[in-house]
Image: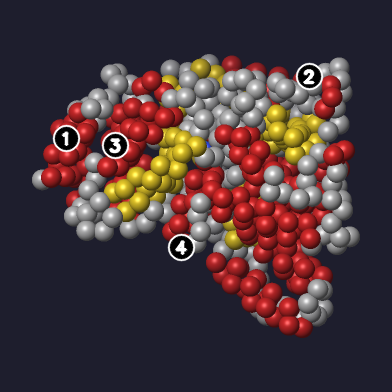
Amino acid sequence: EDQRSLLLSSSSRFPPPQGVKLSYGTAGFRADASILQSTVYRVGILAALRAVKTQSVIGLMITASHNKVSDNGIKVADPSGGMLSQDWEPFADTLANACDPQQLVQLITDFVENENITLDGAKSVEILVARDTRPSGESLLEAAKQGICSIIGAVALDMGILTTPTLHWMVRARNKGVKASEIDYFEQLSSSFRCLLELIPRGSDSRNDADKLVVDGANGVGGEKLEILKKMLNGLVIEVRNSGKEGGVLNEGVGADYVQKEKVVPCGFGSQDVGIRCASLDGDADRLVYFILPSKSSRKIELVDGDKILSLFAVFIKEQLSILNKKRNVNVNDGYQCCLGIVQTAYANGASTDYLKQLGLEVIFTPTGVKYLHEKAAQYDIGIYFEANGHGTILFSEQFLRWLEAKITELSDVAKGSEQHKAALRLLAVTELINQAVGDALSGVLLVEAILQHMGWSIEKWSKLYEDLPSRQLKVKVVDRTAVVTANAETVVVTPPGIQEAINAETAKYPRGRCFIRPSGTEDVIRVYAEASSENAADSLANSVAKLVD
Ligand code: 16G
Ligand code: ZN
């Protein structure tokens, strides 16, 4: 009864916006910040219920990632540090769209009963709340806290301004019972990075100023945090641009999404950067792409996207596994077969898929959205997933980790300092450097840099692992994007009938042609992707398929 009146009174302070229907899309709720107070308050309630149900720490992140600065959003991190379990998404939708306090409380009461959640407040639960640098974040964070506190026994811990992946990392760490502050996160990243450099065969030939990395921080939280992290690193010189302190606007003409989609130089970069290794983070630092400015005269960049980061990681991991499994000092052939899987989406450049397959790797496809890729990658001993847009990570199974640790113990007895021993130690360092909760631009940048140094590769050499097929992306505004339903990891349109046949007929006209359409999960549009052997061909295929949708 106390619970009921508490909810009734707090929810009356957060009336929902009129005439908008919100949905917990691929990346939580996202909209213009001015209409989000009630949604964020309600997601606070949901997170508290999730914490009670799982008896674990839950995370709440207030961010709209690469969207414009006036937008904001909110998403939930589950106990593992991953995305909210998909079976709770429909509840998030109904909760956000309840039209008055009575209906809201009724929905909660029914849900609590169905899910067998006991709300006696006997044991308190914690919800970690954080936000990116958006000005609207402060008051939205307050609304989230109000939602959390409306569930008896739930406690909100304000973590302040964080990158999205740091919050996910903290949730995961807290639930494992290990140290989980932001400083612990920075320390884990910098020490595992140092470890990888120390294990470089030629001895660590530290990079100097002439070989610096320049990072575009998207005028967001990532740049600000990288300024702190870089001071804890040896053997790598990083210059941060667009850290948000120079007056630039979040995501405006900057950031990973802009660089990857437009393939042009971001603000703050210019002729002085020709030939230099550059990288771009997105607004909440969960995406990473690299790029090179090929010449002074052009705004075009050579993009080194998520597919290439994936390929670099895959080459390195595969190499370390094969050193480790060579029968030399210790017979590692103990019957354990490490299963390595690569997960991509239909947006992966066809050339990357060919390259990975030609390395003998198993490549699997899922629909767009981290939750799908992550789930798939978790089915392997080592699962590497990336979206072309730069979101991705590496997952290691518990079983693999136990096997690796046992190997290291064994090798340090009989073959200390051997290549086999070092390969095992490198893999262990990767499990600590990479953020296994979710894709993380800061941990990603350090792994890329460590591998490039290990291989002795320049960014040009890396970029030439394979040559991207020319591609084009378009979006078409439609009245109802849900009219398009796809299958086979979004590669085939099922409804409306007839469209797929028409797409096939168009595609067949182009050498190396590949094309698909899908409804966006974040905007009211249908997206078109086309790939072909020349830029003109890719453009023309995309344009003719876009006309089919209109
Ligand atoms: C979200 C997804 C991202 C996906 C993008 C596609 C997460 C955390 N983020 O940003 O993975 O690539 O949506 O957007 O899942 P779209 O559906 O509008 O093309
Ligand atoms: Zn993001």
Instruction: Determine the image quadrant of residue 175.
Output: bottom left
Residue 240 place in picture, x, y as percent:
70, 33
Disc 3 packing (10 Å; few <14; some 14–19; many ≥20): many
Badge 1 is on which residue?
8
Q: Which of marks 3 and 4 is nearer the N terminus?
A: 3
519 w.r.t. 154: above or below: above
**Labelled pair 4, 1 in contact (Cβ < 8 Å):** no
Q: Which of marks 4 and 2 is nearer the N terminus?
A: 4
Task: Identify the element where label 2 is drawn.
Answer: loop
Q: Distance between the residues labelled 3 and 2?
A: 47 Å
Q: Which of marks 3 and 2 is nearer the N terminus?
A: 3
Q: Note whether residue 488 is visible.
A: no
Q: Nearer the viewer's eye, disc 4 or disc 1? A: 4
**Labelled pair 4, 2 in contact (Cβ < 8 Å):** no
Badge 2 is on which residue?
299
- In the picture, measured across the screen, residue 151 lies left or right of residue 476, that is left
Residue 356 place in picture, x, y as percent:
74, 50
- In the picture, measured across the screen, residue 378 lies left or right of residue 15, that is right
Badge 3 is on which residue?
146
Residue 428 place in picture, x, y as percent:
67, 64
Give, as a three-letter code, the residue at label 1.
Leu
Q: Distance between the residues labelled 4 and 1?
A: 35 Å
Q: How far apart are marks 4 and 2 (CA)?
A: 48 Å
